[in-house]
Image: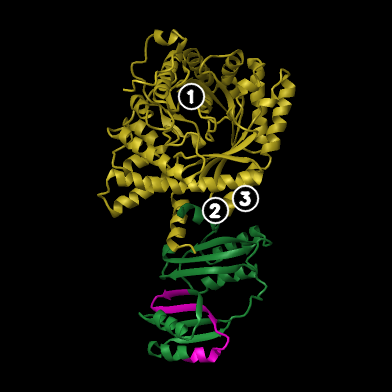
Amino acid sequence: MNKAILSVLGQDRPGIVAAISKILFQQNCNIENVSQTSLQSEFAGIFIVAMPIELPLETLRVCLIDALQRFDMHVQIKPLQPQDSGFSTADIEPFVITTKGPDRKGLVAGIAEVIASHGVNITNLKAVFKGGEEPGDNIMIYEVDVPNHVDQKILDQELRERAKELTLEISIQHRDIFEAINRI
Amino acid sequence: MLTDREILSTLEMLENENLDVRTVTLGINLLDCASHDLNKLKKKIRTRITHFAENLVPICEKIGQKYGIPVVNKRIAVSPIAVVGAALSSSQLVDVAKTLDAAAEQVAVDFIGGFSALVEKGTARGDRALIEAIPHALQATERVCASVNVASTRAGINMDAVLLLGKAIKQAAELTADKDGLACAKLCVFANIPQDIPFMAGAYLGIGEADAVINVGVSGPGVVKKAIDRALEANPDLDLGQISELIKKTAYKVTRVGELIGREVAENLKIRFGVVDLSLAPTPHVGDSVGEIFQSLGLLSIGVPGTTAALALLNDAVKKGGAFASSRVGGLSGAFIPVSEDLNISEAVRKGYIGLEKLEAITSVCSVGLDMVAIPGDTSEETIAAIIADEMAISVINNKTTATRLIPVPGKKAGDFAYFGGLLGQSTIIPLNNASGENRFIRHGGIIPAPIHSLTN
């Protein structure tokens, strides 16, 4: 079996997942992972699928584009490469970085730059900017994996300095505290 | 993946509702430091404490920072000094207190508890020496806390010890008259004292405990109050069963924080984790008050009719939620009502909503007792002993813990203001009614026998 990663983007409406999964089933593909979300009115879905060896990737791509034409979706499919990024999920500690503060351009770029400069991987990012000066209306939540070799004190300090420059309130906490408080 | 709501509600508890870990308390066993040679004993105690507690403060701070939860106090509790120093005289025991103080200062902890005696069934020579040493020990030290267990459900009430304590409290107040009798704020008189309290002034390491143990005291009255306020704003028609359920869930969350941090501190120090004390412990800050919870529940103030029922509901719900959240709970575990340490309760005293009698009544359903109660400076030692005896009786008969921390403020009378500072707070001095004249009952001394456990009417 070959593996492929499929991403689908477009305006959200009922029937998108049904249409995609029907084609995958007809082509004898097995869905291994799906993540789907909608952001405001936009649909985004990522599928990792195992394909029969005899099925060319291009054939599957054409089938999917045909099936999703009526939805006007953007479809991308490519072979899934074995992990070679050098980033390992072993020896990491999961942290949550949360910011609140007045909306302005460059907030995500400013914080993400510091995170990236330490080789820290963002595993989940949610940001809501309703605009205006009310801090609670403009929130970023980064779930990140901090490799154990990263000096957390320096990361902490640099994030706090950057947040101050961006007039943001920032919290940096190990993920376990949220699990402990909210989940049984 | 965490939900936004989980993250934001947790941050709200930390930033605006005063959620913290009130204390991480390291229990250290000193029993094998015992010696009739004072210098040897002091040296052993100092070495033992500094060995175990050397990294307590930096580790608590590191872990507090990791989770974004402040560990407000770092403390030490030791074996009862009346046992460790049983061979010593009263003045030698004052010297031991100074050694404890110096060791506590060296490892930068806030308080060290365990200048204690267990005399519920009788007072041994060493116990008597320790009780007599308490006033000078508390005057001469900054961080040392003392406690004496004078009663238990199994043994009854040692009235001779109660009278000795009345005298010690009076003397401790007079020795610290310039600070409104501050020494008394570091002395608790107990019935049914638990062996693993992490809170001061009652913390000591029980005789049945291991070499070292980490106990944690959580807090969170502000979190409970805000949870009630939010729920009632969304639905003003909630009944008390639903409110109790809400308090349980909130206590669960608060306790989980203590459990997580306590276990990690213990792991880092390579010391066994003991218990989480699931108490709602207030501080003299706005939004961190147990008294405010009564108002959120719909009472005009703590002290008005309905207070005992409300406190019973609160205390029970806290215990239920906390017990589910932690694998090992202990200590006092319930709602504290320390008058001077809680802005709202202190204000209720000033306005006359609550007096000593109602305070005593509600201690029958709370987890502590007459705590941080400032009384007139001219109160006699007999009257102090009599108030203690009443409180002990509530504990002994109802098979629960209670304690007193009474401060007869020298030179001040009912209605005057006493200031203790820091977390000990400030309070209007509470009037004592019908307390003049001789009290021959207390002078009889002896033991009030342990109660019968059938015929429970």
In terms of depth relative to the viewer, which is nearer, B97 or A102? Answer: B97
Q: Quadrant of residue B211?
A: top right
- Please state, as top left, top right, bottom left or bottom right, where the C terminus of chain B lies in the image: top left
Judged from the image, the secondary structure of the residue bearing numbered disc 1 is strand
Is residue A53 found inside the magenta-colored segment of the image? Answer: yes
Q: Which residue is mark 1?
A: B190
Question: In whole angstroms, how far apart are the C-alphas of marks 3 and 1?
Answer: 34 Å
Mark 3 chain: B
Question: Magenta residues, as a range?
Answer: A35-62
Between discs 3 and 1, the one toward the N terminus: 3
For the residues labelled 2 and 1, the Cα–Cα distance comes to: 35 Å
Is residue B415 something one can see in this rendering?
yes
Front label number (3 vs 1): 1
Q: Disc 2 sits on a residue from what chain? A: B
| Closer to the camera in the image, A161 or A122 | A122
Q: Which residue is mark 2?
A: B68
- Could you tell me residue B342's position as x and y percent? 42, 37
